[in-house]
Structure formats: structure tokens, C-alpha cells
Image: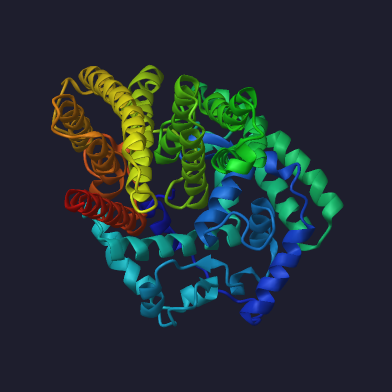
Amino acid sequence: MYKHLLLALSLLIPWTVHSQNLPPEESLRQVIQVAQQIQVEPINGVAMTQNGRLKPFDTLARETILFLTGKYRKWGTDPVQTYLAIASSPNAPYAAMIEVRSPDLRQRLGYTKDKRYFSLADLESSTLGNLAEPIFKKQEEGGKLNEEEKKISEVYSQMAVFQQIVTGEHFSRAIDFSLINGGHQSAAGGILSTTIKSYTEALKQEKMVEAQALAAELTKQSRLQEVPELFRHYIDKLDTEILFNKLSLFFWSYVLSILAGFLFLFELSRKKISVKAGYLLQVLPLIPLIAGLTMRVFITKFAPVTNMYGTMIWVSFGVIVFSLMLFTLYKNWFVSGFMLVGAGLILLLTEQIPLILSPDMDPIVAVLRSNFWLSTHVTTITISYAAFTVAMILGNIALVRLWLSKDNQKFFSEYSHYAYRMIQLGCFLLTVGIILGGIWADYSWGRFWGWDPKETWALIADMGFLVLLHARYIGWVNDFKLLAFAPVSYLLVVMAWYGVNFILAAGLHSYGFSSGGATAITLFVIVQLVILALGLFKFYLNKKQLVKS
């Protein structure tokens, strides 16, 4: 989110905490009290620039508070309120608001592992500066940081951002469009600094009526600044983005998916649902999901798959759509129930870890800013992952069912047919997506195929499922084995989808690179392999007992 080299310059800013040193708990309480008095509107509509686009202050505050505290609403206040309280409260430097996410690093800083939140004063008096100095030097020399160095760099960046909010530099730099105007400040931009100081002073003196009037003026002035053509379309969409932030559409899609899924799974509720009602229940989660995707496309002017967060949302959409297809063809309530729950869990995971799966709508690197290819290649690749996800869920249902029921032959025959069709669909989509990617690569990089990690692992995932299809076709695997090996093949998709972006983080497909989540993914792989081992063990145990009888 924040460029480390830029934040390293904060070392040059003279800064000393010199306000009254209150206990951290009391300082935090007073900061929260200040936050609760601040009116979010209309200050949340101020136009700001960051990371290559214009965004409302509402979004900038959300992203900043998330980066600092690990949550959007850590203390029950709106991110805009929290941000402005940090900027206007004299006790903010002593409030424990900065989350240090590494227990080992907390100990290296001279604190206990269970102390999770730190004040600016805590970090400034710690050894953080000494730890960070060689890291920034390493970055300047082009060196690659290890995981421990990344954690130190992140905490130093958090401290620097908090420091810049307190001094007002963070806000004033983001609201000034001169950086995107070649360094030339507009007439509107020239009077912004005075209004900002007046607004902050009004907050400090708790003159909330005056602050409201100044906020409205600040919003108006910020939007009157000169904007290059590349950024102009954002100006008219700032209010839409604020609405998008408030609606939490993907959260509501998760709730509706989970509720509909459980209604399908429980016999008591399922008996009371007609087929028409069944269709309606599956369509309901799609309404906020499609609305959310549409709003992201409207705001960014790009297909909603520019980062890992977007692809997760797109896959959950695909799972629900493919579930609806299976329901239309076979009227299997259990399959649709499991798929709705699965899609809901994907949405829940996506919404619960924003520090790993960043929901920001910042643009990707210039060479990849082709809406046509994003809308064809990337969406086709990721929707194929949805088909494979359906097959994976079906396979796991079969592996678990072995321990719950002895009469499984009919079940395996039926569910393997569903899985087979989904794998066929997934392979078709993934193959088409790979070919489209090759054409895009030839257009962008001058070569159709270059064994880039993303290209290679997409091909490996495709080949893995194609092998399973051919093995089933020629009789090498029966109904049960098709179901059992579908989750194993899915691990190749996990590597192509997550592993290349978060573990390898190498190659030309840099739009999706990030870090984090390795523990969760490792746990997923282990659990998946354990389920497979237990399922195979039970299958051969049952087979052995049948032979004896």
C-alpha cells in the first residue's frame, strides 16, 4: 500500500513527542472520545490522490486505518473519525493504536509477545529505527527482503504513516493534486492548505459546527483542482465509491449464500421449499454480488479481477452460477446447498482478511491495463477456478461420506458425473484462458509463451485435471477415485492461483503479487491431504470387508 522508500524519507522529518505523557489506556480513551464527536459527512467526500488514482477521503481513511490497526473499525468508530482524531488529538501519540502483527518482532522491540498494540511514543523509543535502517539501505541497493525484514519494514511504515497523520502531512499531501499535475499547483489547490489548517484547528477546539462548514468547503475546493485526463473519470465517481464502501455488498452476499445453503441442506426446511423458491434462493446472493462487481467496474473502468481480492469474489460468483446450472439440470438440493455454503465461505474469507487480500481498487501496472484482455483472459482463467472449486467440494463430500454411510455406490456414480462435467467445463475455460493469455503476452511482451511462473502453473493445473479426465475416460479411475483425486488436482489450482502470487512473487504477472496467508494455505493443504488419506483408507477398508464377506 505504501512505498517503503517514500516512507523512509520520514526519517528526515524532525519529530519528538512532547505532549503530556498520559497512560496509554487513558490516551486511547480520549482519542476515541474525540473521534466520536467528529461528523463523517461531508469530509468523507474530499477528493484525494494516492497510488495512481483519485479516491474519496472515506476510502483513504479506511485503507490507512486498516494498515495501522489491522481493522477498519477497531474501536467502534468510523475510519474517517479515527483518522481525524489521530490528526487532531494531542493525546494520539500516546494512544496504543498501531498493531505490530509479529509476536517475535514485539519481543525484539523490547516488549512482551502479548503486547499487540503500540503507541507512536512506544515505537519511537524502541529499537525499531535501528532495525529498519539497514533494511532501507538494502532496498535502495535493489536487494530482496526476507520475511522478517518485511515485518520490520511494515511496522516502520506504520509508524511513519501515523507520524505523518499527526503532523498533517499525510492529509495535505493526498489532497494536493500538484503531484499528478507535474508539480504545478492549481488555483483551487493554492487555498487548500489554509482551509485544512482551519478545519484541523476547529476539531482541536471542538467547534464542530464550524468544522462541518469547513469540511463542506474543503470537499468543494478539492474537487475544483485541475485533473489530468487519465484521472478525470474518477471525480464523478467519488460519491459512488463512498456508497460502495457503506453498502458492504459482498458481506450481504455471504450472509444470503450461507442462509440459502443451510435451507437447502436441512431436510425440515428443504421440504417446504418449492423448485421456484429454490431458484429464487440461489439468485438472491447473486444480486448484491453482481451489484458489488458492477460498482467496482464502474469506479475503476476495469474488469473486477485486478488483484487477488477481485479474483476471489469472481470465483465465488462462478461457484453460485455453476451451482445454479447443476440445479437446473439435475435438481439436486444437496449439491446446491453445499455449493452455496462453499461460495459463502469464500466470500467470508475474502472479507475477513483485508490485510492479505487487499480490497483496494488501485490501478495495476501500465503494461497490463488492457480492459479487453482483463475482461477475457483473466476472467476466463479465474472462472475456470470456480468450476474446479465445485469439483473439489464434491470430492470432499464423497471422502467424508465414506465415514458416514456404507451404501455409497449410487451416490458416487451420481456425484462423479457432476464432478466430471465441472472438470470438463473447467479445463475448457482454463485452456481458452491460457490461449488468450498467450495472445495478450504476444501483444504486450512480444512473445506468446515464456515459461513465466504464472503461465507455467496455469498449464500444470490444466494438465493435472486433463490427466484426471482422460484417466476416467479410459477406465483407469472409477467413480470414487475421480471424486477422490479432484481435490488433489485442485491443489495445483491453489498453487497457480495463490502460490505464484504470494509465495513465488516472481515473473511478469506482477499485478497480483502480495504476501501473507501462507499459514492458512499450508493448513488447507494439510487438511486436504488428511481427508484424502482417511477417505482412501476407509474406501479400501470397506472393499476388504466386502471381499471377506
Residue nearer the viewer, 5 or 145: 145
Q: Is residue 450 above or below residue 201?
A: above
Q: Quadrant of residue 104?
A: bottom left
Residue closest to the eye, 284 or 207: 284
Q: Looking at the picture, how far across and down is residue 18, in whole percent?
A: 60, 76
**Residue 317 x, y percent position in the rendering:** 48, 31
Q: Position of residue 358 (x, y in %)?
A: 46, 45
- Name of the residue lying farthest toward the right: 209
Q: Residue at 31% across / 60% down in the picture? A: 136
Q: Quadrant of residue 282?
A: top right
Where 489 sits versus 154, above or below? above
> What is the tally of numbered marks visible in this picture?
0
Residue at 49 percent across and 33 percent down: it is 336
380 displayed left or right of 76? left
Compared with 476, 505 (above or below) is: below
Rendering coords of residue 72 (x, y %): 59, 54
Q: Is residue 302 visible?
A: no
**Residue at the location (75% across, 41% down)?**
42
Q: Nearer the viewer, residue 310 or 391?
A: 391
Position of 246 with respect to 41 (left or right) is: left
Coloration mode: rainbow
Q: Is residue 240 visible?
A: yes
Q: Is residue 167 left or right of residue 423?
A: right
Q: Is residue 547 left or right of residue 323?
A: left
Q: Nearer the viewer, residue 376 or 322?
A: 322
